[in-house]
Amino acid sequence: MKALTRWIADGTPWVWLNAAAVAASILLVTGLLLLIGIRGVGHFWPLAVHQIVYQEADGTEVVVTGQIRERETVTATRLRESGLEVAEGTELVHRDLLKTGNRDVTGQDFRWILEPSIQSMSRPRSMVVLEREEWGVFIGMLIGVREAGQLLESPDTWGDFQSRLERANELRDEIRELEKNRIGSVNYRLERLRLKQRGLELKGKLDAENLADIESDRALLQEEYRGLEQELVDLYSKLQLGAVVVTTGDGKELELPMSTIVDAHRPNQMGLAGKIGHFFHNCWKFVTEDPREANTEGGIFPAIFGTVLMVLLMSVFVTPLGVVAAVYLKEYARQGMFTRFIRVAVNNLAGVPSIVYGVFGLGFFVYTLGGSLDRLFYPEALPAPTFGTGGLFWASLTLALLTLPVVIVSTEEGLSRIPRSIREGSLALGATQWETLWRTVLPMASPGIMTGLILAVARAAGEVAPLMLVGVVKLAPALPLDGNWPFLHLDRKFMHLGFHIYDVGFQSPNVEAARPLVYATALLLVVVIVLLNLVAIRVRNRLSEKYRGLES
Amino acid sequence: MKSSDTARPATITARPDSFHRWRGRKDLLAKRVIGLGGVMVIAAVLLILFYLLYVVMPLFLPAHASQSNLGGNPGWTGDKTVFLSLEEQQQVAFRVSQDGVAEFFKLDGLSVIEKILLSDDDRKVAHVAGDQGNSGLIAVAFDDGLVSLVKETYTTDYSAGIEQRTIKPVLEFPYGAGQRILLPTGAMTGLVLSENDSQLLLAAAGIGGQIRIELNTKQENFLSGEITLERSVKTFAADFEVTTISVSSDHRWLYLGDSTGRVHFISIASMETIQVVQVSDAPITSTSMLLGGISLLAGDARGTITQLFPVRDADNQFALEKIRRFESDQGAIVRIIPEQRRKGFVAVDAQGGLAIYHSTAGTLVLQRQLDNGLPDALALAPRASGLLILNTDGSADFMDIDNEHPEVSFASLWSKVWYENYEAPEYVWQSSASSNDFEPKFSLTPLAFGTLKAALYAMLFALPLALMGAAFTAYFMSPALRRLVKPTIEIMEALPTVILGFLAGLWFAPFLEENLAGVLSMLIVMPIGLLLFAWFWTRSQWRIKSFVKPGWEPILLLPVIVVLAVVSMEFAGPLQSLFFGGDLRSWLSQEAGISYDQRNAMVVGCAMGFAVIPTIFSIAEDAIYGVPKSLSDGSLALGATSWQTLVRVILPTASPGMFSAVMIGLGRAVGETMIVLMATGNTPIMDWNLFEGMRTLAANIAVEMPESALNSSHYRILFLAALVLFVFTFFVNTGAELVRQRLREKYSSL
């Protein structure tokens, strides 16, 4: 007993509790990363399809097929409350979330099944999972391929189907290329022509000669458009590759046009190698494809592209500004009231809530600056705004302002690590202050600048709140970088990974179906940000070690 | 400079002077540019502050009005104008004179466009009433009690281009050109016209307290689309002197003002008096319905206007309540003109004084004297940006009114306001609705409350973990482990809040709903379990102890915490069945009367706490780590234990730094957007309940900013919310930074 009081009196329990606080924080971080990692990776892993004979609440037996997505334990009380019959005496019930797919047939993608009601469970090898352009996935059995009303006799139905699918995908790629690039380009040029005409009209310079020029250009473009349209019609007619006949788990026969099927696999026949292969195939598709079905299916390529482009532009703005400000604070200004003032300002910039930057960006950049730009340079497009609405340029500027303190603080830290003797040596040799800065100090501080830039990029990639106000959209019709002059369209709206998470996770009509995709997107974002931060930490640590030697 | 140059100093001096001048100029230029860069940071902060102020400012600027003369029309002298209205573009106006002349005229030059005679005999017009729903329908009553229904409509002709648009007025007779008998005895003293989707109501007051209401139910022929009226008449005999008559726009209530300052509240369905309210001790001289037709504005002979509306009580009975008074000690109120788009109104008194009020804000917006005394007639433009005044001498004035944001006052933003259809004054944020006559409710109080609530719960979660963790990391932890922990915390800080919010909303909220008891029991199980473990660990003689060196305890505790978490989850089930009837959540709602939302303050507290832990941790850790070693060495040498040294010596020294860490963490929690947006239901309620949600200032901006119209009151109020956030974090951050700077000086002096 005495030992216990002494143990308490000298404060050891508190030390242990403090240690526990550290441990808890570490556990929180790692747990969160693990959660995202497992769930995110799970999105790509081909799951086995189970065929389950299930007893419904009213006693009827049905056959359900699907992939088990989640398993959880619930109290029997809660199930009884929600109107389900649970046998007396059971306290806890296991239930599975089954992804059944076939939304077009049953009206839903997911259903919960209670494990006690499962009569039997099997994994038929012939189960196929078809990804489609709409209605989500189809889960069932492949019967054959039907063409012109005839079921094709073939020894290898799957192979036959695969080759057709490949052909369909090739055609779809061609169609997409045609629609997006070539027809998109013609449309873009037509729109520019319209704006040119309107611009001349506004200036009062639209005479017969101009008009004739414009009209002839327009006629040419329309001719080109008709040609492309014909090509498109041809491609679409080629895409009529017949239909695939399938049956659902409970034996309903369906016919799906070949042109609507995007991908297919038979998870129950895959070995480990096959599954790994399919896993990487899915990962690749995820990062390179466009989203489908209101962002709940398909890939996230435009969001990645938009994020990267926005971050790059932001770096262009923020690096010089931040470095100059830091150099001023450290190398030029006399330390005193004024620098103290600036440091307070920097700290404030860092502490201002990001949504305030969004409000400022919307009011000042978009409405005030953008509105003026539109009136001055784009009167022909009015009342449709060009820069007077959120877009890539304003978003990058807003985020540059937001990440400015990150770059300043980091650069300053880099500068302060450089020993005085190096500057003094340079000045003693007769170099001016600028030459000292440019030739010796900045090159030595460049890892500090890099650290700041990397941290700024990581911050900008994850920031969503201000972007929601200054130019991010859930679905951008065109990428901000394309083959049409001037190639980089600073006024266009863009997609962003962080906003994609928010939008798909919280605004989409089918949150349950979209959830794995959100986890996968979150995983990608977290991986990028964690990597960037780790690199920044590494660079900074190496820098400090490098100069520790110089100081002594 | 090439290396060969530096090797032989003589060649430097041999450079021509122009080269050195060039170097000097370059140096100077660089100095200027870099100096500019330093100033720019301050400029950026000031720009944000002043831009926000610049947008918010108009909310609090007073309204302006300027009156100008439009000239006169000789035809109007001697023919008193009894009705006047102005169309949207403020180019064309419409008047009805006492002689039964209806004419459209241009404001520019007062030239008459079209003149229509409403009666061909010499009957005089007794009363004219415009539809209080602003449909353009007008009832013209003659002195024999007959009424004509006419409708003014305007079409805009853009054929000559947008700039040269012309407005074409047309007078229609939507219910036929014939006249209807409203008050057979004539001698009308008051007239009301009200049209809604299903009914057309005409009410008249006659001498001797006679009230007649004609209620026309609209029947639409679904083949021809023609509307026919089915008429019913109700009467009421008043035993008091009726001075004013008004009808609510849902045609349920009739309001009669009398000469003793009372308002009689009468149900139209039964034509029975429900209540008599003493509004004033002077006669009621003018009444009007506010936009929306719910509130009655009653003006008396002393110049006071009272707003009243029916309030439903607990028994579902309506009682007429006096809501607020607008005082101006001038003459008797002669006319009250409600605005057509907002809950404001204009009042004119017998001395020719004009006052503009706003009902929700409860403010007198503007008061001035009309240049030419009490006029014949007034018309307020539909956008309330201008007032047309026809004087008794046949001349006309126009008053430009600049009154953009009357609905905003300090009281309407921060105090309780009694809104229409509410049972009592309340704090409400509800910025928009589908209907046009909606009363916007711009109370920032529930949002500020929600912000503080979210921040408070976040700090409750974060503070113990962050501060205790910082103390251990800085003081007890082995350097090798510290090199691992610090980057981990930095990674934690770098995690995008959108991901935390998404996990909080889609993973943690359902998890918590299922395992509420388990999570709550962790609060008890964790500390007890950890202390028990620590006690047995220190007492035991296990060989494994030699592997855990001092300063590595957190690693040892990792599995312990996991085990304890699993234990509390597993034992929550039995505990629930024992104490809470099987399920804590249903027990909470049924027994304790605490409602439970899935996305609640606890979810937000944990998620946002997670987000602010690293901020607080890093700064506090720096402050503790920076305490000079001599202090702790001295304390230890005097025989204090390391815990005593930490609590008595280190922490007091580092406390300013820890304080600034907490402040900065608080600033971050207050301004955090995405987590709150995703992890709560975003309902602006005021309740400290841990299991209900909230809406914060920041989340509110994110939700509503994209749909608010540029420069509208709503837009500016959202900017005001941003300004509040900015100023709050400005003070917090500046304070924290000053504290830290002082601390740094203190350390360097030690």
Image (cartoon, coloured by chain):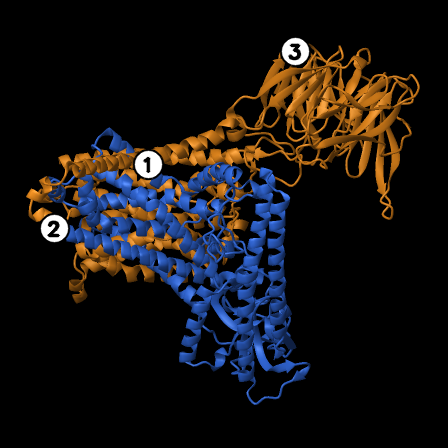
Chain colours: A blue, B orange
Using the image, tell me which numbered label, if any, was put on residue B371. Answer: 3
Examine the rendered structure and indicate whether residue B242 appears above or below residue A306.
Answer: above
Q: Nearer the viewer, residue B219 or A7?
A: B219
Do tags 2 and 3 sit on the same chain?
yes
The residue sitting at the front extreme is A209
Q: Amino acid at mark 2?
A: Ser
Can residue A503 be seen in this snapshot? yes
Distance of label 1 from label 2 (alpha carbons): 38 Å
Subunit that carries the residue with mark 1: B
Q: Which residue is mark 1?
A: B41
Return the chain for callout 3.
B
x and y, in percent, of residue B394 in the image: 76, 12
- The residue under label 2 is B3
Residue visible at 40% across and 65% down in the picture: A38
Q: Is A495 above or below relative to B391?
A: below
Point out the frontmost of discs 2 and 3.
2
Residue B411 vs B741, above or below: the answer is above
Which of marks 3 and 2 precedes in the sequence?
2
Q: Secondary structure at mark 2?
A: helix
Is residue B123 found left or right of A414 in the rendered image? right
Report whether residue B736 is seen: no
Q: Position of residue A391 (x, y in %)?
A: 48, 47
Is disc 3 placed on a helix, strand or loop? loop
Q: How far apart, in angstroms, are the residues tagged by discs 2 and 3?
A: 87 Å
Using the image, name the chain to which the residue with label 2 belongs. B
